[in-house]
Amino acid sequence: MHEMGVVSSILTACTKTAEREGATRINEIRVKVGELSEIVDEAMYFAFDSLAPGTLAEGAKLIIDHVPARSKCVECGVSFGHGRFDITCPECGSFFCELVQGRELDIECIDVDLPEEAVAGDRVEEP
Ligand SMILES: [Zn+2]
């Protein structure tokens, strides 16, 4: 399953960031998934539930934001939304279109818990 690998690298990146920040746990991971990225939500949740236990992200919520596919016409410059197989300019009918968005697979943000001392430490450093 493709999603296992995807979730595994998301988890690695998130736990690395969380550890660097000194976080005690990850509450929420929000990812951006393009409509053309061939990712199945259910498979993502399943992979997350199987891989997160034992990491800082155990019990965290995985939130998937879908990014609709959009292309820009190379001929007339119009930008338009479309499905997986109908990438044709609605203005001039050209097939020369550049995908602007829709293939994303990015970590948008993560929400972590920081230990009390770290929060207090930050406050002291402020001018
Ligand atoms: Zn066009």
Image: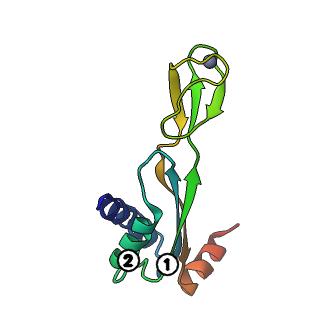
What is the spatial separation of the Cα atoms under label 2 and label 1, in whole angstroms? 8 Å
Where is the C terminus found, in terms of image quarters? bottom right
Three-letter code, disc 2: Ala
Q: Nearer the viewer, residue 50 or 52?
A: 50
Q: Is residue 87 left or right of residue 9?
A: right
Residue at the image position 56 percent from the left and 54 percent from the top? 66
Three-letter code, disc 1: Ala
Q: Nearer the viewer, residue 62 or 68?
A: 68
Residue at the image position 64 percent from the left and 28 percent from the top? 79
Mark 1 and ligand 1: say if the CB distance to the nearest ligand atom is below 8 Å.
Answer: no
Instruction: Determine the secondary structure under disc 2.
Output: loop
Rendered position, 31 above or below 89? below
Q: Is residue 97 left or right of residue 9?
A: right
Residue 124: which quarter of the image?
bottom right
Where is the N terminus found, in terms of image quarters? bottom left
The x, y position of residue 91, in whole percent, is: 67, 20
The x, y position of residue 36, in whole percent, is: 47, 45
Q: Mark 2: few, some, or many residues within 10 Å (few <14, many ≥20)?
A: some
Residue receiving disc 2: 52
Residue receiving disc 1: 60
Q: Nearer the viewer, residue 51 or 119?
A: 51
Instruction: Determine the secondary structure under disc 1.
Output: loop
The answer to whether the residues at label 2 and label 1 have Cβ atoms under 8 Å apart is: yes
Q: Which numbered circle lies on residue 17?
A: none
